[in-house]
Image (spheres, grey):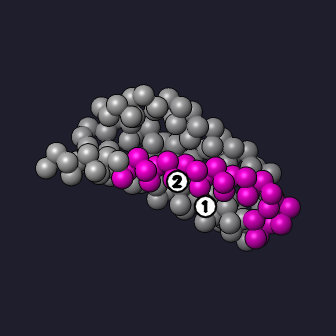
């Protein structure tokens, strides 16, 4: 296992889990209609998936497996940012809460991007 992951995994596991919980609670406050319903569904999927996939990345079987799985986490956080933007347009009253969640998704995205780059550079050094 990677030192960085072993050292910080609990903090990020908790942070991603809390983010997923906040996405769920946020989505429960949005009234469903023909526009918001599909956005809510996609937001819940991507906003919770990043936490589950991060847990899987922490249990990676190799460096390449970790890089692959953290890449999935990165994709999910990017997608979550998109859906948060979409829901803020489709339901104006949630704009401020959506903005706060977007900021957290962006921070997570930056963390996971750096984690992937670090892992990739370690793999390339081994070659």
- Eye-nearest disc, 1 or 2: 2
**Residue 109: mark in rendering:** 2
- List x then y, in percent, for residue 108: 55, 49
- List x then y, in percent, for residue 80: 59, 58
CB atoms at circles 1 and 2 under 8 Å apart? Answer: yes
Give yes or no for residue 108 being in the magenta stretch.
yes
Q: Along the polypeptide, which appears first: circle 1 or circle 2?
A: 1
* Mark 2, other Cα within 10 Å: few <14 / some 14–19 / many ≥20: many
Instruction: Identify the residue position indicated by label 1 in the image.
Output: 81
Q: Quadrant location of residue 2? A: top left
Measured Cα–Cα span from mark 1 to mark 2: 9 Å
- List x then y, in percent, for residue 41: 63, 59
User: For this rendering, which residue is in front, 26 or 64?
Assistant: 64
The number of numbered badges drawn on the structure is 2
Looking at the rendered structure, the secondary structure element under dot 2 is: helix
Judged left or right of residue 79, residue 38 is right
Please say if 18 is above or below 70.
above
């Amino acid at each position: 296992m990677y030192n960085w992951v072993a050292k910080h995994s609990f903090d990020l596991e908790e942070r991603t889990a809390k983010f997923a919980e906040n996405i769920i609670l946020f989505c429960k406050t949005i009234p469903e209609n023909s526009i918001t319903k599909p956005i809510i569904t996609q937001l819940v999927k991507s906003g919770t998936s990043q936490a589950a996939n991060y847990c899987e990345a922490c249990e990676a079987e190799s460096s390449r497996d970790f890089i692959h799985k953290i890449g999935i986490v990165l994709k999910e956080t990017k997608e979550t940012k998109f859906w948060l933007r979409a829901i803020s347009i489709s339901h104006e009253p949630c704009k401020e809460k959506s903005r706060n969640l977007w900021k957290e998704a962006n921070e997570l995205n930056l963390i996971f991007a750096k984690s992937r780059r670090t892992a990739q550079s370690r793999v390339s050094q081994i070659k």
